[in-house]
Image: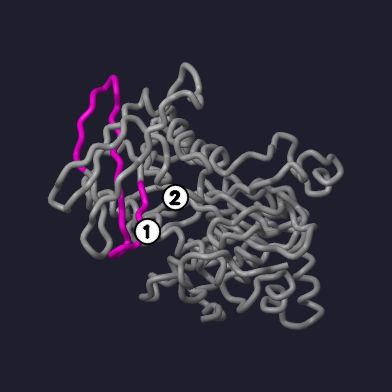
Amino acid sequence: MDAQPLSPVGEAAVSRFAEQVFAHLGRSDQRRWARAYLQGLLSVPGRKSLANMAAGLASGPTAAATVSLSLQQFVNGSTWDWRPARRVLAGLAAGPRPVRAWTAALVVVPKRGDQVVGVHRRFDARTGRTVKCQAASGLFVATDRDAVPVDWSLLLDPSWTDEPQRRARARIPGDVAPLPAGELLVGMVDRLAAHHPVAPLVAGLDAAEDPIRLAAALARRSVPYVLEVRGGQAVRPVLQATTGRHGRVHQGTVPAESLFPRRRPRTSADPQPVLRGTPVLPPGPATTAAPVTGTSAAPVHRLWARCDGDGGPRRYWLTDLAEDAPGVLALLDAASATRSTVDRLGSDFGLLDFSGRSYTGWHHHMTLVSAAYALGRDLAVRAGGSGGTAGTARAAGGTLRDSA
């Protein structure tokens, strides 16, 4: 379902929300264009290009051209700081509901041109193809209702940072380096933890190339986690088979000092124990593990194996939490809700539609997209719905549709 024109009540809500989230903007005209951009993302159907949103907001072609130029200047030309707005969004994300988890996702947006900031060729694990795309790492605050985006990082390859002229044209700050998704995620966790109570981080394999390195970084920060690991991921010790009420399962105690070696890196001469053996699980979604204990000197990790259906793919999750099965399932459900949010952001809120050449412009756009989602969700709840005002969620999974 496409976006629908906002009611007068909706327009008033947009105004109040924009004043709250973008109160740090020093000029009234900037706050006015933030409000207009939000209204365009929420109410204009189809592709959320500047021209389309301007046409939907203005009363005629001449006025639309003026509005388009003003929106272009506000998003791509202005230098306003997006970080205060994201901090406000993080505070508003939960509302009266308790935060269940922080979740992460990697977003791959295919692009045809070469000039859109951040475009490069990369392998997309979800489709099994190498594509020309923008790629972004996102951090979300998840409750029992949904997951709201609160921070974003753009993945850059050296072609954007090692060429001074290209870097200058894209307005990429001098301290921005071409980091992998996992390191970008740690930076976002640091920013969120600096202003908000810590919650467990739940991240699938798409969110970090090396989940063990991510686990080590989170452990140093005392951030609990549930991280997906590959079936062949090295752990210590090798899992031992046992029998539990869920059938044949595998359990493993993983001392932190063994999992995160500090004295020297592992070499090819070291033993390489792996997650081996396959749990025999009942049909349907199931998560199994066996309880383990540890000491303060050697924190214990738990390994969970989940099978989504009879004979379906098995996925493995490593956690330093002593949660039982319902607690782990709730956290994994938060990860599923995040993928649904990403699909909604792409289909209904303009996540796919940025075509500018400015690094700062991309961050401005993503901040406004996140704000539109948070506001749209609240407007729908007030109206008795279950999601944002801009339409229904698309099926989860897959690379997002191609755009310019």
Q: Which residues are magenta?
A: 290-316
Disc 1 and disc 2: Cα gap in Å?
A: 14 Å
> Pointer 1: residues within 10 angstroms few (<14), some, or many (20+)?
few
Q: Is residue 298 magenta?
A: yes
Q: Secondary structure at mark 1?
A: loop
Q: Amino acid at mark 1?
A: Pro
Q: Residue 272, percent across and down?
A: 41, 31
Helix, strand or loop for the magenta stretch, by majority: loop
Q: Residue 374, percent across and down?
A: 48, 61
Between 94 and 173, which is closer to the camera in this rendering?
Answer: 173
Name the mark nearer the viewer: 1 or 2.
Answer: 1
Between 217 and 87, which is closer to the camera in this rendering?
Answer: 217
Q: Residue 187, percent across and down?
A: 55, 37
Q: Which quadrant of the figure has residue 130? A: bottom right
Q: Is residue 157 magenta?
A: no
| Image marks 1 and 2: residues in contact by CB distance under 8 Å | no
